[in-house]
Every structure is written in structure tokens, then in C-alpha cells.
Image (cartoon, grey):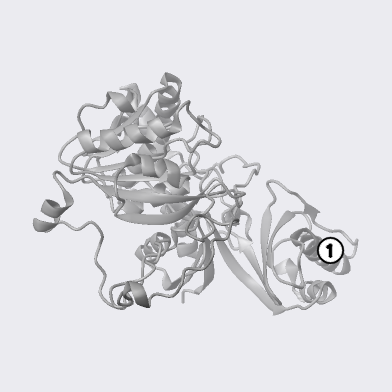
Amino acid sequence: MTTTFDMVAKTFQGLEAVLADELRALGAQDVVPGKRMVAFKGDKELLYKANMCCRTALRILKPFYSFEASDPDRLYAKVKEYDWSSLFNVNQTFSIDTVANSSEFKHSQFVTYRVKDAIVDWFRDHDEQERRPGVRLDGADIMINVHISETKVILSLDSSGESLHRRGWRTGSTDAPINEVLAAGIILLTGWKGDTPFVDPMCGSGTFAIEAAMIAAGINPGVYRKHFAFENWKDFDPELLQEIYNDDSGEREVTCPIIAADILPKAIAIARDNAKSAGVDRYITFETKSIVKWEEAPQPAGVLVTNPPYGKRISVEDMNALYKTIGTVLKRVFTGYHAWIIGYQDEYFHEIGLAPSQKIAVNNGGLECELREYLMFAGNKKSFRAEGGKLKEERRDGDKPASGERKPRFNDRDRKPRAKRDERPARPERDETRGEKGRKPYNMRKAPLMPSISADKEIVVNRPAWRTRKKRDENSENNDK
């Protein structure tokens, strides 16, 4: 009988619904999206598949112990009660990652120390020679995640190890490359499945184009990973992982054009190398070309996704002019396309000069950004709607907005009838510390918040001898011919 258990998949804000769909497609049960995470149930095979196949997961956790603790002493005592020999032995190393949202446990580092002490003391008390396992910050054999919400403590095994955004294909990068998980999530949010042209006119190191090619070709994102943390677990099944790893039944040839362009020759060279490492270079057309040089786009109409400079870590001499040029090129060249642009400041979005059909909040490199969709239809809005076009996807009453999508401030039923001019209350005196309309202006330059899930910097061990490099070897043979 197959044993199922609870699991948690971590992701970025705005990608929860996409990740939930991925997990359901893999056969996950009781899938419940949350904030930057998705809870679900499954067996060992699903845990392996989630790590190998999910494009929008950062890591997969397996909770194994939960309890209540109202102070550090109680935390220590409860952790020490657990039988830690069921998970690992004194010859293995372990690490602890803590996330604490509690008035009782305000410092996550202190929590980490107390949990570490409890585990070490348990091994000393149960070993005749008082031996203890070692602690490693990077590349530990066993990775333990501690999550505290007020007094509720959940301990989980991290099955992924190195963050899953580290696919294993990246050989180089330009400044501030977009995270692979975020790139794949944005592509899946667009609804693109490899059946229409895909364009990134400012591709940098090629992340969007490469992730798009892997989606179109049905290549699992974990196929070039060197190691997963669950390979160090006591119940690891190498034959099961090898079966999943070598299952290429979902792979297919890519027939739609995928174009990646950038003004910098160096960026294109890096993108080519990355694509070759991922085995998808034959599916992508790379061009060294400025955004202003675009004269025509692949037809029939497709999807454009790009991540232009924000003016923070990467900037150009005239940011306003750059975004104005983007808007001009979209209107002139990409008629019929769905254009998706991720940005940081309203000021620059405004320069595009187009009304977005969707706005989705996303976190990119610690910056609270927005992903905006623009429908590039011919003519004006009136004629577009008259022909049956829709600027926004209409929802039935009671439907919830998609994860990450901003809820409208009001709808027609909530709109109150306008009072006559002489019936309106007197306008309050203007607060000099606020904007012209008496409201504090939204400051998009506020201090950036770091994402709750940071990218790991771990040492990855060599690939086990039992696992063949089937897909990369096949690509190498094809390139040699």
C-alpha cells in the first residue's frame, strides 16, 4: 500500500495558483494554495516528481514533527523529545533554516541555535561515546526547516537542498538575471504553451527564452540538476528516481519560433552558451538588436515577455525614453500579440502609453514589482470591443481573482450615486504633508523587502554514478553530427 504524507512547495508571490496547477497535473491530492506556498499530499514518487518536474517551485518540504512552544526552553525540550536517529546518524551533517513569525520568538537565529542544541544533545545522550553529528551551513546531508507561527512550531525535511531555481544549465549571466522559477512562472501565467511565437526583445542572459523552449519541448526543469537533498535520506529509492529522471515521454519537438534579442553582443553570447547547456539552442533564434531596430514580428500573433531595466541595479541614460520606445515598438510592430512586461516603477510604466489588461504583483530579486499585460490589437478600443475582443478576462459573480492579481477597488454595484454639488460635504483643509488630493502618494521607491525564500549558496556534490546523463549525452551526439 502506498503511503501518502503532507508536503509543502515554496514559491514566489503571484505564482501560487500556477504551482498548484502543476502539482495537480502530477497527481497531488488536497492541493491548497497559500501565501508563497502550496500545501498538498502525495507519496514518495510524487515528492521526487515535484522536485524534478515543477517549474515554479523553489523547494519541496516534508513536515515530520509539530508542537506548541511558548518560550525557548519549551522549544528546546520538545525538539529533544524527537527520535532523531529515525532521520540521520552521527556520521552525517545537518543544517537548519528558520522562519519565525512570532511575538515569542523574534530572532530566527536564536531559534536556530536552540533547535541545533537540542538535536546535538539528543545524539550525545543516546551515543555511548557521546558523539554528535556535525553542523554545516552549506552542503549539509540533512536540511531541516523550522517554521514558527506564534506558538505553533513545524519541523520539516527540505527534500530539494539547493534551491530549485538552480536548474543546472546556467553557465554565465549578465547583471541582475531574472530567477529561473520566476521566469517560468511568468511564462505559464501568460498561458503560452509553445503553440505560437515567443519573443523577448531584451533577453539578457536568455532566461525567458530558455525556460520557454524547455516548456515547449516538455523538458523537465530538474533534468540537469546534480543533486537533491532527499538522496541523502534513509528511505531514498535510487531506482525510482532513475525511472523518473529518464522518463522523456512528455518531450516533443518545438515548431514555433522563439526569438531572443539584446542590444549587447556579450549578452547574446552568454545566452547562446546557456541555451546550449540546456540543450535547447536549436529551438531559439538569437539576434543582436536594439529594441528600436524591430521592424516586424513573427506571425501569427504570439506572446512577448521581457524584463527591461528598472533603473535600480541596471539602468540606461534615459529610462523614460526607453519605456516610451517600448510602447512605440509594441504598437507599431507587435500587433496581435499579448505583451507581458515586468517592471518596478509606475513612472516608467506610464511612459509605455498603453492601458494594461492585467496587473499582477510579483517579487523579483527583493523588489516588489508588477507584471503587466498589454493586448496589442489593431485600431481603437471601441472597434476592438465591437468585434468581440476583451481587454480583461471576465469573471462570473463570486469568482475569486487569480493568485497575485490585484482586487478591483469597487465594481458597478458598489458605486454610490453621485451627490449634487450643493449637497456635498465641505472639502477638508489640505494637509501640507500629503499630496494635492489629500492622500499620501504611493512611493514605489520604498525600501525593498527581501523575499522570504532566499536563493541558497550551497555546495553541490557530484552526480551519483548510477544516474546517466541521458539527455545531455543525446544532445551532444546530435551536435557532433
Percent x, y of residue 452: 60, 57
| 95 versus 285 height, above or below | below
What residue is shown with label 1?
117
In the picture provided, is 281 more to the left or to the right than 145?
left
Pick the residue in front: 214 or 364: 364
Pick the residue in front: 291 or 100: 291
Q: Which residue lies furthest to the left in this view?
A: 387
In this rendering, the count of numbered labels is 1
Q: Which residue lies furthest to the right in this view?
A: 129
Pick the residue in front: 223 or 173: 173
Percent x, y of residue 478: 32, 28
Residue 200, image quadrant: top left
In the picture provided, is 173 more to the left or to the right than 324?
right
Crowding at dot 1, Cα within 10 Å, few <14 / some 14-19 / many 20+, comes out as some
Percent x, y of residue 153: 69, 73
Quarter of the rendering occupied by the C terminus: top left
Percent x, y of residue 474: 36, 34
Task: Please report the residue visible at 82 percent of the width from the left and 72 percent of the height from the top.
Answer: 72
